[in-house]
Amino acid sequence: MIREAKMPFVFFRIFGLFFLLTAIVLLFVSGCSKQQSEKRVDKNLFKEVKVIRIVIKQTYTYNSENTPNLSFSFMLPFKQVAKEILEKAGFVVVGEETKKYDATLLVNAKCKAIGQTYGGELPGFYYTGARITGKIILETFKNRAKYTSSFETYSPPLLNVLVLKDMVDIPDSPDKAPLKELLWGIRPNYSSYMNLDLGIPSCIIDYSWELEPFPLKLLEIIATLYGNEKLIPLLKGTPSGLRFMIIKTFEKVRDEKTTDALISALDNEVLYVRHLAIRTMGEVNDPRFVEYLIGKLISEKEWFVRASAADALYNIAATADAPSEIKNKVFEALISVLNDRVEKEVDQSLFRESVVITLGKFKDPRAINPLITLLEKETKNESTNVRSAIIGVLSDIGDERAIEPLKKLSITDPYDYVRDEATEALEKLKSRLSQAKK
């Protein structure tokens, strides 16, 4: 009787375990299927999209002992950011209530304060950190095709946020403080300070691009579905932070237009956009970049942009399948700028040092004589970084022509640490040449 009483119980346990395992398998398969459907999205389903309706849903909460999970009715600028990106990319943007549109861009975001610390002084308090998570869904009206992407970010602690009295109602106590740093950001638009009359301008903060993961994901969606060519117009007349993200997108989402897109950024008026575009070219490794990069190596005014061009050129030339013609062209271009003058003396030494180090990576004996000539000129220069770089490269190339210059430098250089470097490099070179003869 006891056994009979236990049988139903055992049966239900087995059945329940089977049901649980089945549910787990189904959830896993469903998740995999969803991921695969997003990866295998048919771009043709989106190609007719010209008018996009923007719908934003966002919730902001904070936790405190007195008012747990209190929500605020203030909004982050997702709509403004999305509108600017989409319009610059050539789409027509309409409001949520519009009836005629080709696709809906839904942004569903949540934000929560991190900890209970506050910053600011009366009459403005703000949280010193927050976490944002969200999803971006682009869904076509005609065929209900969807493309989904997620984003997540943490806002950094803020120490210097200006209170703009005419923007929003200022909370008068920490208990009422919203996530203000996410609304106002931390990147000032310094050009606006030129128009100050009463000490506080009406708007001096370019806040939109501090929410970096959101615009970055939106840019990736556009590039994936419509190609990098759509983003080229955004490299003009937009905040510098957005332009950086566009270059990152060119690197991540590569297509047949990636080369043209990066080349278009080489003459951008924002210095660091040019710099980042050149670095990205070195990572993409397209031989078509060589002529453009040599042009920047020779003509660019800023030394570190020229140095980045040198690095990018080496990366392209050093690839296993790079033809000898490209390797020689890059090598000769680097040799040609060794003695270039740069506007500032300190910049000149930094540029020459970077070119010397890049040349050394080739380990090409053709660099020996030009480097010896430069070394003789640099002995009169108080900056020692170029001489130190040449010493290392001469030793690494391993050519006996470097013995006498290194010996002379180990005795005559006015700086003892440079003499020590030359002595050590000379011993290393002699040892290598001796072993090579055996």
Image (cartoon, rainbow, N blue to C red):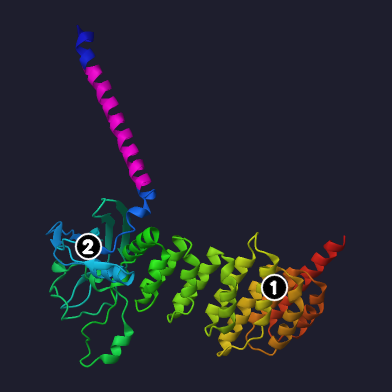
The first of marks 1 and 2 along the sequence is 2
Residue found farthest to the bottom: 197
Query: Within the magenta stretch, is there residue 395?
Result: no
Q: Residue at x 38, y 73 (%)?
A: 233
CB under 8 Å between discs 1 and 2 = no
Q: Main secondary structure of the magenta part?
A: helix
Q: Nearer the viewer, residue 91 or 351?
A: 91
- The image position of residue 92, as x and y in percent, is 26, 68
Whether residue 417 appears in this view of the structure is no
Label 2 CA crowd tier, 10 Å (few <14, some 14–19, many 20+)? many
**Is 429 displayed left or right of 221 in the figure?**
right
- Residue at the disc numbered 1: 392
Q: Look at the image and give the residue range highlighted in magenta.
A: 9-37
Q: Residue at x 21, y 66 (%)?
A: 94
- Residue at the disc numbered 2: 53
Callout 1 amino acid: Gly
**Is 345 displayed left or right of 152 in the figure?**
right
Indicate whether 151 appears above or below 314: above
Query: Within the magenta stretch, is there residue 33?
Result: yes
Looking at the rendered structure, the number of numbered marks drawn on it comes to 2
Q: Residue at x 16, y 61 (%)?
A: 99
Q: Nearer the viewer, residue 62 or 237?
A: 237
